[in-house]
DNA sequence: TTGACATGCAACCAAATAGTTGCCTATAAG
DNA sequence: CTTATAGGCAACTATTTGGTTGCATGTCAA
């Protein structure tokens, strides 16, 4: 459908710096490369490479505006692997979880 | 608490062979190294290394039984990153998701 | 137009990764 | 006891990865 390459997404998420960049974009979307560099102990070029990898995985999209480049987070691929892959392993726990919830509600009178 | 090292989990999940091993253990838990090797185009040693990485990330536990070693999947770390990390990015989508679906239905393509 | 600023591009480097081969150890079976 | 089977360990290799430096390009502002 889109660039739904699970492998690229998993590989992109494997690096702590890239997850941090996603966290930052989550806090404030649409940041420039320069802004995303601030406070990180990396060169601008390194950050640019990480952002390129995130873009290849479709986790980030960018658009140039004048001499700046704005970066936007795209949660769709994360949602996709959550649905197609992660939930599968959670399912086993879900039944236990709902039982627990119910037990807590019943017990505390909500 | 446990070996709740998010980074190790993400890195372990980054490799397609390791995800395949998890899939296989999900289908049938408690397999031996030899069983897990079958059908894979890798040496036994390579598979053993992957399993070691999965164990370091606490995604798999193993126990020796006679001359065999049984491997068991542990869904807790996956659940953990789903709760602490992935759901965060999904939350934003929840409201946008229905709108997106509708948009895709109306205007399929881009 | 000139300079400062934001980003792009390419070559290079060290370390990590994924895989191999070769050999050793331990257990089960004949 | 001997042999086949299941796995462990270590050295080595090629490729990928994460990062750097240096320089080029494009755009805004004075």
Image (spheres, coloured by chain):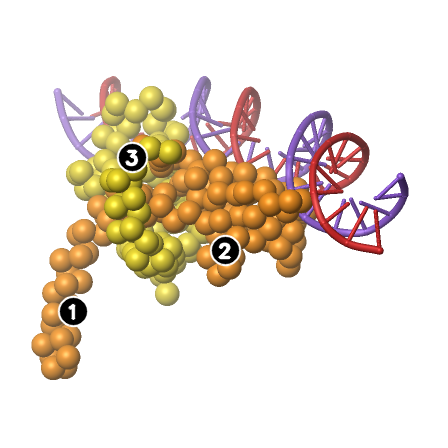
Chain colours: A orange, B yellow, C purple, D red
Camera-side mark, 2 or 1: 2
The answer to which image quadrant residue B90 occupies is bottom left
**Left or right position of B110 against C5:** left
Camera-side mark, 3 or 2: 3
The quarter of the rendered structure image containing the C terminus of chain A is bottom left
Using the image as rendered, state which of residue A3 and residue A5 is in the foreground.
A3
Residue pictured at 36% horizontal, 43% vertical? A77
Q: Are marks 2 and 1 on the same chain?
A: yes
Chain letter of disc 1 in the image: A
Chain letter of disc 2 in the image: A
Q: Look at the numbered disc 3 and give the secondary structure of its residue.
A: loop
Using the image as rendered, state which of residue D18 and residue C7 is in the foreground.
C7
Residue pictured at 65% horizontal, 51% vertical? A34
Question: In x, y percent, where is residue A64?
Answer: 59, 42
What residue sits right under mark 3 in the picture? B108
Mark 3 packing: few (<14 Cα in 10 Å), some, or many (20+)?
few
Q: Which mark is residue B55?
A: none
Residue pictured at 36% horizontal, 58% vertical? B92
Question: In x, y percent, where is residue B81?
Answer: 35, 55
Chain letter of disc 3 in the image: B
What residue sits right under mark 1 in the picture? A101
Q: Look at the numbered disc 2 and give the secondary structure of its residue.
A: loop
Contact? badges 2 and 1 (CB < 8 Å): no
What residue sits right under mark 2 in the picture? A29
Camera-side mark, 1 or 3: 3
Mark 1 packing: few (<14 Cα in 10 Å), some, or many (20+)?
few
Q: How far apart are marks 3 and 2 (CA)?
A: 26 Å
């Amino acid at each position: 459908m889109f660039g739904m390459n699970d492998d690229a997404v998993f590989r992109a998420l494997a690096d702590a710096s890239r997850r941090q960049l996603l966290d930052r974009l989550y806090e404030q979307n649409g940041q420039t490369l320069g802004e995303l560099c601030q406070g990180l102990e990396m060169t601008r070029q390194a950050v640019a490479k990480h952002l390129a990898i995130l873009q290849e995985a479709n986790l980030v999209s960018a658009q140039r505006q004048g001499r700046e480049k704005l970066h936007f987070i795209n949660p769709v691929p994360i949602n996709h692997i959550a649905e197609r892959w992660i939930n599968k392993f959670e399912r086993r726990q879900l039944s236990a979880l709902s039982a627990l919830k119910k037990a807590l509600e019943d017990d505390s009178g909500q």
